[in-house]
Amino acid sequence: MSEKDHGTELVRLQGAALGFETGRPLWQDLDLSVHPGEFVAVLGANGSGKTTLLRALLGLQPLSAGTIEVLGKSPKAARREVGYVPQQRRFDPLTPVRARDLVGYGYDGHEWGLPVLNRRQRRERIDAALAEVGATRFADAPASRLSGGQQQLLRIAQALVCDPRLLLCDEPLLSLDLNHQREVSAVVDRRRREHETGIVFVTHEINPVLPYVDRVLYLAGQRFTIGPVDEVMTSETLTRLYSSPVDVLRVRDQLVVVGVPDHPAHQSEPVEEP
Amino acid sequence: MSWDKIFNFTDYSELLPLVHNSLLAGLILGLVGGLISTFVVMRDLPFAVHGISELSFAGASGFLLLGLNVVAGSLLGSVLAALLIGLLGVRARDRNSWIGVLMPFGLGLGVLFLALYEGRAANKFGLLTGQIVAIDTPALSWLAVISAVVAVVMLLIWRPLSFASTDPEVAQARGIPMGPLALLFMLLLGLVVAMAVQVVGALLVLSIVVTPGAAAVRLASTTLGATVLSICFATVSMIGGILLALGSSVPISPYVTTISFAIYLLCRLIAMGKGRSRAV
């Protein structure tokens, strides 16, 4: 993919470093490009700078060094064409917001001025986004009453309603059960196949997205490696990355990573919370 | 004690014209208080309302002592408090302790100013507990103009404010300037509180700026629905309170706060009865 010309790159990081002001960078010399329709998974332990990378791509966090371009512009200028899916977080039960209102925020929630006059077009777009993720049946339910999985489907509809060219997902599968993890991953995958949307998918659990991932960016203690799953998710690569013995086992169609320092078996079991 | 002091409707029709200004003020305050109230609740700012109103009281009593315009003093105190809370209390925990620090200071200043003031005693207590027919026509004009400004700005920032108040993480990612927006909202809140202090008094502002919104979110399932309900609740409390207070010799505040509280209880009961499903 790297021989494609720059014009088609959705994300272009060159010599990027992020270290806050402490002098101890999370990562440095990072070169990364994401192309239309490409699914890039970002893996790594907690505190390895996965979420910070997304914040940089959203223009919420300046780089310490290097350059960053999103859709050929500064991240801030590109925001309107970038979808963002956050971690699942429960809404307060008294939040007066329905599922479709949440998606509506994605459509025009950032716009100032009197509320829209073209209500019909707005409604059609919201309905289409809800249908795209299979959320039509709970479109009018209060957002706070939905399950974690339903909320994440809504989050994706919210990100897709503005027809983004790039979708940034920050641990969208966290605290979902296995079925919902698969459902959410499949929706994201279909989007990039049908609309050539580039996907940057931060996750600490690769298995639910394993069938879809084109490349993995693996961050570990100031170092990183980028490449296809088969190259990155191997005992040799991760052992080199962590400078400590790590075993990657393939059990049926799942990857199990054993021996990651400080985070025992953090790859091997999906996090499930009620 | 005679009930006549609390409820007395003899000569009601003659008294009504006397409170013409108060009714108008109550209506305006109900509209704008209800409008902002839903967002106060969604943004978890009830304590900030209390803090702002105490500094508003300090400003008003200071100006009273100096023989200046009380409404202007109230506005000054309010806006200053809103800015201080908005700038120095960004995170919720910081904010609450900062308000807790600021509030007694404001109240203490107010008490000092009133102790030094040698004018009519009713003026003193009016600022804390509300007044009966104290709204003169110039004060009413202030109220109307400021309320119109608040209402227009609220409409213009409606969508980003709703987004930021219910879904802050994504709102920030979408490029909504969260800090400036929060500060602007605090400023609007300061203006509303300053006006409410004139009518219901500093100690009871919460009944107009917090209770209606807290009641509305129990029943409503959309932000717009909650705001419409909240405006209705605040207006009913204000107008109802003034009309009931008319025949009595007590200030309007206890009537307003009681109606407001009763509406809140009713909303909780209805919500419980429906298994917390939403109606609007």
Image (spheres, coloured by chain):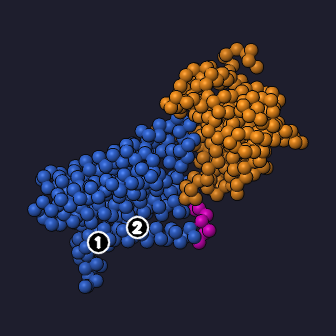
Chain colours: A orange, B blue
Mark sitting on residue B245: 1
The quadrant the C terminus of chain A occupies is bottom right
The quadrant the N terminus of chain A occupies is top right
Q: Position of residue A120 (x, y in %)?
A: 61, 42
Chain of the residue displaying label 1: B
- Let me know if residue B44 is in the magenta part: no
Q: Position of residue B12 (x, y in %)?
A: 26, 74
Q: Residue at x 80, y 29 (%)?
A: A236
B13 over B57 or under it: above or below:
below
Q: Which residues are magenta?
A: B273-280
Q: Is residue A242 visible?
A: yes
Apparent side of residue A177 relative to residue B53 in the rendered image (left or right): right
Which element type, helix, strand or loop, lies under badge 2? helix
Q: Nearer the viewer, mark 2 or mark 1?
A: 2
Apparent side of residue B195 relative to residue B115 in the rendered image (left or right): right
Q: Position of residue A119 (x, y in %)?
A: 58, 42
Q: Where, by quadrant of the figure, is residue A247 drawn?
A: top right
**Amino acid type for the residue under numbered disc 1:** Ala
Q: Residue at x 62, y 68 (%)?
A: B275
Spatial CA span between label 2 and label 1:
14 Å
**Amino acid type for the residue under numbered disc 2:** Ser
The numbered mark, 2 or 1, whose residue comes first in the sequence reads: 1
Q: Residue at x 35, y 68 (%)?
A: B256
Chain of the residue displaying label 2: B
Q: Is residue B27 visible?
A: no
Q: Which residue is mark 2?
A: B260
